Image (cartoon, rainbow, N blue to C red):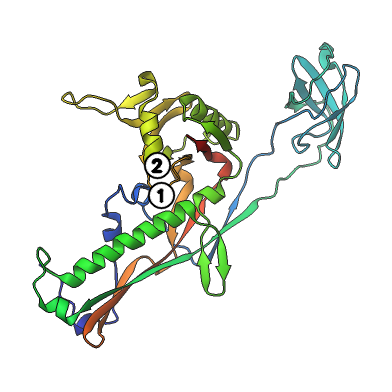
């Protein structure tokens, strides 16, 4: 039975979230994959992230086999008393200058052979040199990092003239409800695009959220060529090295139609196929890599030359409290019925090093 919009509904807000989630998943695949998470209470949603102190870096500049100073790209992982490994040699760190990123070391620790070190070589913390009866070491603490994103308002108006209500609409039982459903689809598409493409912006009462593309900054590779399983494997390795797979994750590959077709053309032994016995050809639904099997999600809201590898467990679309998508019937205004659909949402994107992006794909 068609819903009747009359004076008894004026000003009463009804949630339309369930209707949003029932929209065509091929138009809003990310919303349909993630759903909506728990509400936030402020227009600037804040969360805190923590991570372990690193345990490796790279050597900056060549070092002779007799040198006792080693400059590194990042001094944070190292402390006095650490035993570190470079190639087959062990070194003991005796001092760390964080300003110049210089380690003072003793060479050939534990009877290993001191050797020349080339620029860019990995230097890895193994353990601290423990001694019986030693005093407690000075503690180290890595401050948690504050992250935030803004809520963004998505709204539109439903309006049906008296004449349009009066005439017969072929195949449409309730024209107002029909127009409302169209507005829901339009707003869902706007939200999907903001979650992916949004750029953080605030001016007066206008707020716009930061989207996935702007969040991912660490693991970004300009391929400048065609998409390959090798390029995706390399991207996954960067995420793995940053600890992205330590909790398992629910990783998805997101691409537009052009790269979806390209993925379907990769080696058959590298993909999982969904194909009925009465069909021919191949369609990539999951890509099998050295780091797991990733669902391939088709989204026309990505650029045609990019690919996202994201962990759905670290992404949440959150409404502002009491501001999930809702419709309010405003009643008859002159010779027309009108109403408003509005929702306010933000994106919580956790641990951006656990996600990656390929760009410059042919």
Note whether 345 is above or below 99 in the view shown: below
Q: Residue at x 36, y 40 (%)?
A: 257
Left or right relative to 21: residue 250: right
Front residue (pair 22, 165): 165
What element does badge 2 sit on? loop
Note whether 333 is above or below 241 in the view shown: below
Quadrant of the image occupied by residue 96: top right
Mark pair 2, 1: CA separation: 7 Å
- Asked if residue 17 can be seen in this view, the reply is no
The tag on residue 256 is 2
- Asked if residue 30 can be seen in this view, the reply is yes
Quadrant of the image occupied by residue 242: top right
Residue 62: % across, % down:
83, 23
Q: Residue at x 47, y 48 (%)?
A: 315
| Classed neighbour count for the residue bearing mark 1: other residues with Cα under 10 Å, few (<14), some (14–19), many (≥20) | many
Q: Marks 2 and 1: CB-CB under 8 Å?
A: yes
The tag on residue 181 is none
Residue 312: % across, % down:
44, 44
Front residue (pair 129, 310): 310
Q: Residue at x 91, y 18 (%)?
A: 66
In the rendered structure, which disc, 2 or 1, sits on the residue that comes first in sequence?
2
The tag on residue 301 is 1
């Amino acid at each position: 039975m068609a819903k009747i919009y009359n004076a008894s509904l004026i000003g009463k807000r009804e949630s339309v979230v369930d209707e949003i989630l029932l929209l065509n998943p091929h138009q809003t695949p990310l919303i349909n994959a993630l759903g909506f998470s728990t509400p936030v209470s402020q227009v600037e949603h804040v969360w805190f992230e923590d991570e372990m102190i690193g345990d490796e870096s790279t050597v900056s500049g060549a070092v002779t086999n007799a040198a006792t100073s080693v400059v590194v790209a990042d001094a944070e992982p190292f402390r006095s008393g650490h035993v570190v490994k470079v190639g087959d040699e062990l070194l003991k760190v005796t001092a760390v200058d964080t300003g110049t990123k210089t380690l003072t070391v003793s060479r050939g620790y534990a009877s290993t052979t001191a050797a020349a070190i080339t620029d860019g070589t990995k230097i890895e913390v193994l353990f601290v040199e423990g001694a019986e009866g030693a005093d407690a070491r000075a503690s180290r603490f890595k401050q948690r990092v504050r992250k935030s994103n803004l809520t963004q308002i998505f709204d539109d108006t439903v309006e049906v003239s008296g004449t349009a209500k009066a005439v017969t609409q072929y195949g449409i039982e309730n024209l107002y409800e029909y127009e409302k459903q169209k507005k829901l689809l339009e707003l869902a598409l706007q939200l999907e695009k903001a979650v992916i493409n949004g750029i953080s912006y605030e001016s007066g009462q206008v707020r716009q959220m930061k989207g996935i593309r702007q969040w991912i900054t660490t693991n970004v590779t300009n391929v400048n060529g065609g998409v390959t399983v090798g390029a995706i494997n390399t991207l996954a390795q960067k995420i793995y090295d940053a600890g992205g797979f330590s909790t398992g994750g629910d990783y998805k590959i997101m691409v537009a139609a052009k790269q979806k077709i390209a993925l379907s053309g990769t080696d058959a032994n590298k993909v999982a196929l969904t194909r009925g016995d009465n069909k021919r050809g191949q369609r990539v639904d999951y890509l099998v890599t050295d780091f797991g099997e990733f669902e391939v999600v088709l989204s026309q809201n990505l650029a045609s030359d990019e690919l996202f590898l994201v962990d759905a467990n670290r992404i949440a679309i959150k409404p502002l409290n009491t501001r999930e998508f809702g419709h309010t019937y405003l009643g008859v205004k002159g010779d027309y019925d009108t109403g408003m659909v509005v929702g306010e949402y933000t994106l919580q994107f956790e641990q951006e090093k656990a996600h990656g992006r390929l760009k410059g794909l042919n």
